[in-house]
Amino acid sequence: MTPAGDESTIDSEKESFSMGNIVPQDHQLNIGIWAKIEADVRVLATNLGDVYVVTGPAFSASSIPTIGKDAVAVAVLEYTWKAVYEPGIGAAAYVSDLRFQ
């Protein structure tokens, strides 16, 4: 789940749109708090150098929202998370929750 804006070349930016790098995501999350988290991590990496980032989706066990119809419905994640480690400084984790958008 590497943001296209984090890529250093046009070719690698295009590659970030592959199906291996995306998850179904609520549009409000993607343009809202998640965009701010990605921008903040980008600034951190630009200012401090080496930053290790792991990002992933999480689904609710009780209710999984979907997009699409019937047999082609696709599960939409309810949470996204991002763990950030800056060597010598520390670590942080972010969890977004669609219910609080």
Image (cartoon, rainbow, N blue to C red):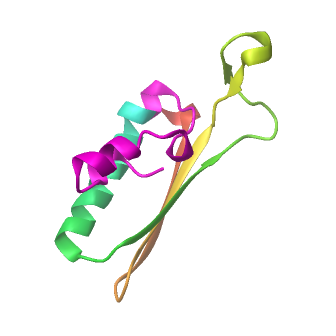
Question: In terms of depth relative to the viewer, which is nearer, 92 or 20?
Answer: 20
Q: Would you place residue 79 above or below residue 43 in this image?
A: above
- The spot of residue 89 in percent (x, y) is 34, 84
Quarter of the figure with residue 64: top right
Asked if residue 11 is among those painted magenta in the image, a careful observer would answer yes
Among all residues in the image, which is located at the extreme front? 11
Q: In the displayed structure, would residue 95 be above or below residue 69?
A: below
Q: Is residue 74 left or right of residue 28?
A: right
* Horizontal side of residue 54 vs 74, given as left or right: left
**Residue at position x 29%, y 47% from top?**
11
Question: Residue at horizontal 36%, vertical 50%?
Answer: 37
Residue extending furthest bottom?
88
Side of 3 where 94 appears, left or right: right
Q: In the current view of this chain or complex, which residue is farthest to the left?
A: 47
Q: Residue 60: image x %, image y %?
A: 73, 40
Q: x%, y% of residue 93?
A: 49, 64
**Which region is colored magenta?**
1-29
Q: Residue at x 66, y 14 (%)?
A: 68
